[in-house]
Amino acid sequence: MLYLLQIKTMLDALYIVLGLVALIFGGNWLLKAAVALSLRLQIPKIVIGMTVVSFATSAPELIVSIKAALDGFPDLSLGNVIGSNIANLGLVLGITLLLGTIQVTKSFYKTDWPVMFLASLIFFAFLYIDGQLVFWEGLVMFSMLLVFLWYLLRFQDHAVVDELPEDDVPLPLYKTLLYTVLGGVGLWGGSELLISGAVGLATFFGVSERVIGITIVSVGTSVPELAASVIAIIKKEKAISLGNLLGSNIFNIFAVLGITAMITPINVMDQALLESDIYWMLGFAFIVLPLVFVPSKMRLGWRDGLILLAGYAAFICLTIS
């Protein structure tokens, strides 16, 4: 019996490694497709980052949340989204900013951040009223996503300065589609492997469902955002990096929870989700705005990254303690 447990633990560790490799390649392929698509359609890269890239990198959250809710693990479903939104801003954006600064223009605080924060408030209100998300609430959230996407495609301007536009080389349409498919499959498959391994190890050590969802699973499903954002910022495609993170949080709430709630009601089982975790999510969603103005106006730098990472470390320590 002990031998079998050791084998399973080794397999879980292998799944984590293979998942990370698939996510890195998937992030790179998806980034190539996103840049090529923005060039071909003459759409600002921030829009591509908040639609194509965000949808693909939010696919793991969607799959995990629907499966968890249908299997009778609502806390895993909710914890996954809440934890992912926290990880996207605290962990992913924090790490991204340590690698380079992001110059921000006015559409960030006029459109992108307000919609992300509004989505967070709506999610909080729906959940706080009766401790559950039902069909009509899911329909409202998903409808708001469609309105937001329509607005982006019609009116959104550049939100971030692209440092190396001369590096943008148009790709043939078939290559763009191929990179999109390969990137999506790589991110989805890598996340599945990573989640499987991480949950297996966590279960082996006797961690609760909520803690698994809010920490390990959420970090696992945020690795696509991390991979895509780090690759983007290394390649100076910062519009996609910032847009991907903001868009992913919006997608996680409006699309992931919206679609999941329309399929099956999601009930809060562990009150810590309402008493602690969701407030952390609102806090991280809010703090991005003042960080854009202090200490350097309209810029996010390494100091902001350290603040976000410190906040995320505090959240993890308090959650598992």
Image (cartoon, helix red, strand yellow):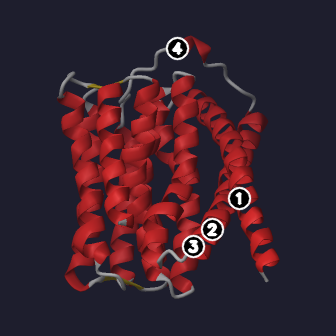
Q: What element carries label 2?
A: helix
Say the numbered circle drawn on residue 205: 3
Say the numbered circle drawn on residue 201: 2
Q: Is mark 1 on a helix, strand or loop?
A: helix
Residue at mark 1: 13
Residue 127 lies in quadrant: bottom left
Please name which of the two marks, 4 or 3, marks the residue nearer to the observer. Answer: 3
State the CA–CA distance, disc 4 to disc 2. 42 Å
Please name which of the two marks, 2 or 3, marks the residue nearer to the observer. Answer: 3
Q: In this view, does 199 lie to the left or right of 117?
A: right
The amino acid on which the numbered mark 1 sits, given as a three-letter code, is Ala
Q: Is mark 3 on a helix, strand or loop?
A: loop
- Residues at discs 2 and 1 in contact (Cβ within 8 Å): yes
Dot 1 or dot 4: first in sequence order is 1
The amino acid on which the numbered mark 4 sits, given as a three-letter code, is Leu
Please name which of the two marks, 4 or 2, marks the residue nearer to the observer. Answer: 2
State the CA–CA distance, disc 4 to disc 3. 47 Å
Q: In this view, does 210 lie above or below 256?
A: below
Q: In this view, does 74 lie above or below 78?
A: below
Q: Look at the image and tell me whether residue 71 can be seen.
A: yes
Q: In this view, does 196 lie to the left or right of 251?
A: right
The amino acid on which the numbered mark 2 sits, given as a three-letter code, is Leu
